Image: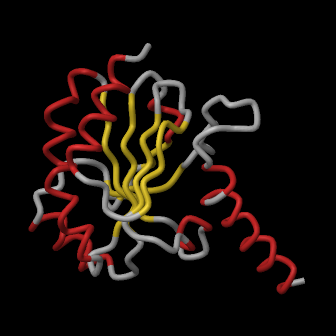
Amino acid sequence: MKLRFGTFRLALAAAIVGTALLTLNANGQRAQVPDIRMATIDGKMWTLSDLRGKVVVLNFWATWCVPCRTEVPYLVALGREHKQKGLEVAGISLDEDLGLVKKFITEYKVDYPVLIPDPDSPWRSLDNTPTTLLIDRQGKLIQKYIGAVPEETLRADTRSALVER
């Protein structure tokens, strides 16, 4: 039974981070991002579906990830610059040591929600950090960036998403 459940979790993780997050579905339309619900580092619940009507940049990162350290400052700036236009930035830390995460948040002046997946969450099985999702106002995936996304690319794609209705 335990093996079967573990296999199920692995298959679910692959579906969520892989197939379910293809930019376009079989009909050539943007794919719906599965609802994400998890606690922030300060214990509040965060739910993706609560942000319908806003454009969301969701960044999977870790304190040990060198490209993540490059991305975080411009994610902070991007969030501040476009918040009034309907942009929300959030990060999902893949670290196990919350002390390191808190230190990182302070050092990099992260002012957006930092989410912490449960230890057995399929979101923890993400192989590539950083990975960033750009999600439209209806909760559909505009773009999935694997690895560090160039700042100008993310800025241009975000500006385009913000003008869509």
**Residue sitting at x 55%, y 65%:** 123
Q: Quadrant of the C terminus?
A: top left
**Residue sitting at x 53%, y 25%:** 138
Reply above or below: 89 against 145: above
Q: Which residue is at the front of the view, 153 or 81?
A: 153
Q: Which residue is at the front of the view, 150 or 71?
A: 150
Which percent across, then down, holds residue 145? 42, 54
Furthest-top residue in this view: 165
Q: Which residue is at the front of the view, 132 or 108?
A: 132
Q: Based on the displayed image, in which of its 4 quarters is residue 65 positioned?
A: bottom left
Reply above or below: 140 against 74: above
Q: Quadrant of the N terminus?
A: bottom right
Residue 14 placement, left or right of 99: right
**Residue sitting at x 22%, y 59%:** 71
Please say which color scheme the image uses: secondary structure
Q: Based on the displayed image, in which of its 4 quarters is residue 73 positioned?
A: bottom left
Which percent across, then down, holds residue 137? 46, 25
**Residue sitting at x 28%, y 28%:** 159
Residue 12 placement, left or right of 103: right
Residue 6 placement, left or right of 95: right
Q: Based on the displayed image, in which of its 4 quarters is residue 94 positioned?
A: bottom left
Furthest-right residue in this view: 1
Which percent across, then down, holds residue 31? 64, 37
Residue 61 placement, left or right of 33: left
